[in-house]
Image (cartoon, helix red, strand yellow):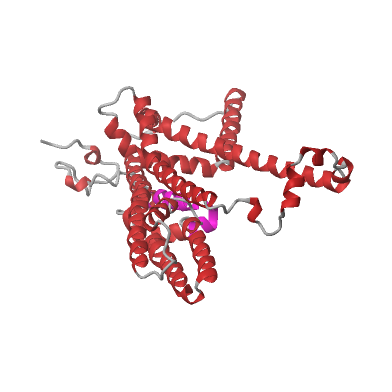
Amino acid sequence: MSEFRPSRYRLGWWSLGIALGAALVYVVYSFVGTFVFGVFIYYATRPIYLRLRRVIRPASLAAAISLFALALPALLLVVYALSIALNELLKYVNSGAFDPTRWPLLDEETLGSIADPATLLTLDPERYLSAEGFRSLLSSLGSAADTVAFLGIGAVHLFVMLALAFYLLRDGGRLSRWTLSRFGDDRGILESYARAVDRDFKGIFFGNILNAVLTGSIGVLAYSILNVYAPTGLRIPAAPLVGLLAGIASLIPIVGMKLVYVPVVVYLAGLGILTDPTALWFVAVFALVSFVVVDTIPDLVLRPYVSGRSLHVGSLMIAYTFGPLLFGWYGIFLAPMLLVLIVHFTRLVLPELLQARPIQPYAVDPGSLPGVDVDATPDGSEDDAAPQD
């Protein structure tokens, strides 16, 4: 057996490798949410990509179309919602709600002085350019700059997510083959572990899309039924659209569909207070149905069931529940990923490591192979015997 003798040459390369690995870990840790969401987009679009790849060449075009196909339903719903909002806004404008002459705090004399250019020229600029006004202007400009920077950073993160998903779709097969050829073992443990993890990742992440579709269907049904019993003048606006938007919003961690039904609750409550306070019971029923039937039950029961078909539903439910609390907004994806990695490591590798036996892939039962004696000792030749015809 050759003795390992470190040299300055090897120590230098090891130092460089450790430094590069630490830098990579730091980058992934700093943007872990972006990488996790990029992996989610990859697994959500991979079934679409595999079907398109059979008829579309090259692979880059198939990957781009797959990403667009995933976002297309959400984009169509958003455009439809914006068109309805714009239509309602035009109704208010045409009804004269934005006519300044109808506002109680403005009279004809004030409007005339504002619209008269001669009046504007007679104003004293020093009256409005005081130190306090200048500080207020700078504060407003700073807030606007922070908003623009936030939107810009969000756009960069979105670009990285899409780019990561795109290249995983296009080059994921070559990357997996290269990894197995470089670091795989002769018993196929790494390949078995990778296949098991990949299978459950696919089920979990594509299950999130399926959960959004089912949740949207539940929302459409629940809100349409509520509208049947709604008091006059207090109906849910565009109930099917609200249900579909709630399903899409369920993909957003933590807040999720609350972004959809909470504003509707506020709108209905304000409308009920102004028109008929005795009808506020419907607002309470809508809020209760939204929170329990549309939000909580699908998220705690339906999502683990459709996502983790080969995992314990209870453990997956706990991962979905505590993930956002532990890791933040991306925890709803990261916690199930960690669960899958831990479960399959425990099933495939850990028993053999603890018993100091040669590691054998979980996916292949040695007893099912003809000609292999499962009772042979690790150092016996029968353990490595090839199957006999």
Q: Residue at x 62, y 24 (%)?
A: 8
How far across and how far down the image is residue 5, in percent? 55, 28
* Quarter of the rendering occupied by the N terminus: top left
What percent of the width, then of the height, locates residue 281? 45, 75
Q: Is residue 332 left or right of residue 378?
A: right
* Residue 355 can be seen in this image: no
The answer to whether residue 208 is seen in the rendering is yes
Q: Quadrant of the C terminus?
A: top left
Instruction: Say which of 242 and 231 sits in front.
Output: 231
- Comparing 251 with 108, the one in front is 108
Specify the segment rendered in magenta.
322-344
Check if residue 265 falls in the magenta segment.
no
Dominant SS type (magenta): helix
Quadrant assignment, res 124 = top right
Which is nearer the eye, 247 or 24?
A: 247
Q: Is residue 84 above or below residue 228?
A: above
Left or right: residue 190 versus residue 386 is right
Asked if residue 324 lies in the magenta stretch, the reply is yes
